[in-house]
Image: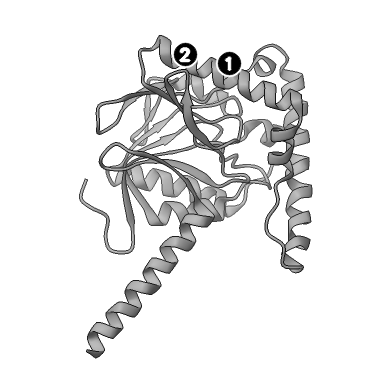
Amino acid sequence: MSPAPPGLVHFRSVFISDIHLGTKTAQPAALLEFLKVVESDRLYLVGDVIDNWALKRNWYWHQTHNDVIQKLLRKARKGTKVFYIPGNHDEMFRDFCGQHFGRVRVRHDYVHRTADGKKYLVLHGDQFDGVVLYAKWLAHFGDRAYKTAIWVNQRFNKLRRVVGLPYWSLSAYLKRNVKRAVEFISNLEQAVVRAARDAGADGVICGHIHTPDMRMIEGIHYCNDGDWVESCTALVEHMDGRLELIHWNEYKKTLEEEHARSHSDGRLAAAG
């Protein structure tokens, strides 16, 4: 694929998950901003793209949700290799693993090889979530509780912005400080790391728990690309194989500052 046009950022690979289209807590506008600016040779959709759980309970589908789907399909048509690895919220699409739809490859999991030759097992991660596997009713209950927490948190942070305070995440606080939540996340991380080791991979890339992270665990490079409900994060692979976790709101500010600086330098050069 040719380099991105001026103003765009080009990566070798991009990994995003947990978009949850079909819910009011999704952030399709932020994702569209990201997709318009970021180009890649490969794009991995690592599960929970469409939230079928939520759609079955209460139908909600904004035009921006359509726009995200159309943008993803357009990238596939223009040459980006798009891989779709369904998660638990869009598990119905697992029936189509191994098939192609509109140049989108549907896979249960996938082994990605980086530019520097390392192998990464890519999977959503719910396969190792005991609640999802053995107590789906409890998983649905937890999902509703999480969405309620996000709804409350969004309104709470509107008040914080009014008085000039920075964003504060209730769900992130609970994940860091509630013992059972910490244990659950740790257990799932250990499970996906074991799966990567069993597959002979150097690392694992997953989503599911909405907790962006990247670190070494028992010699395996653990990467969680986060979500597009709250954190708005993506994992990207640079052309040399280096992986980086991008927080879109922060990354967007950096790009805007670089664009303003470049534009200012150009005007100074023209004036000189």
Q: Position of residue 1 (x, y in %)?
A: 22, 45
Q: Is residue 88 left or right of residue 78?
A: right
Disc 1 residue type (three-letter): Phe
Amino acid under label 2?
Ala
Quadrant including the C terminus: bottom left
Q: Nearer the viewer, residue 202 or 152?
A: 202
- Residue at image x 59%, y 46%? 231
Which scheme is used to colour this image of the protein?
one colour
Density class for disc 2 (Cα within 10 Å; few <14, some 14-19, many ≥20) is: some
Read off the residue under disc 1: 128
- Residue bearing mark 2: 195
Residue placed at 28% from the left, 79% from the top? 266
Q: Give the structural element (helix, strand or loop) at label 2.
A: helix
Q: Left or right: 50 with respect to 219?
A: right
**SS under mark 1:** helix
Q: Who's the residue at 39% across and 43% down the image?
A: 73
Note whether 257 is above or below 216 in the view shown.
below
For the question of whether residue 58 can be seen, the reply is no
x 70%, y 51%: residue: 168
Picture layout, residue 36 above or below residue 142: below
Spot occupied by residue 208 in the image (x, y as percentages of width and height): 58, 29
| N-terminal-most mark, 2 or 1 | 1
The disc at residue 5 is none
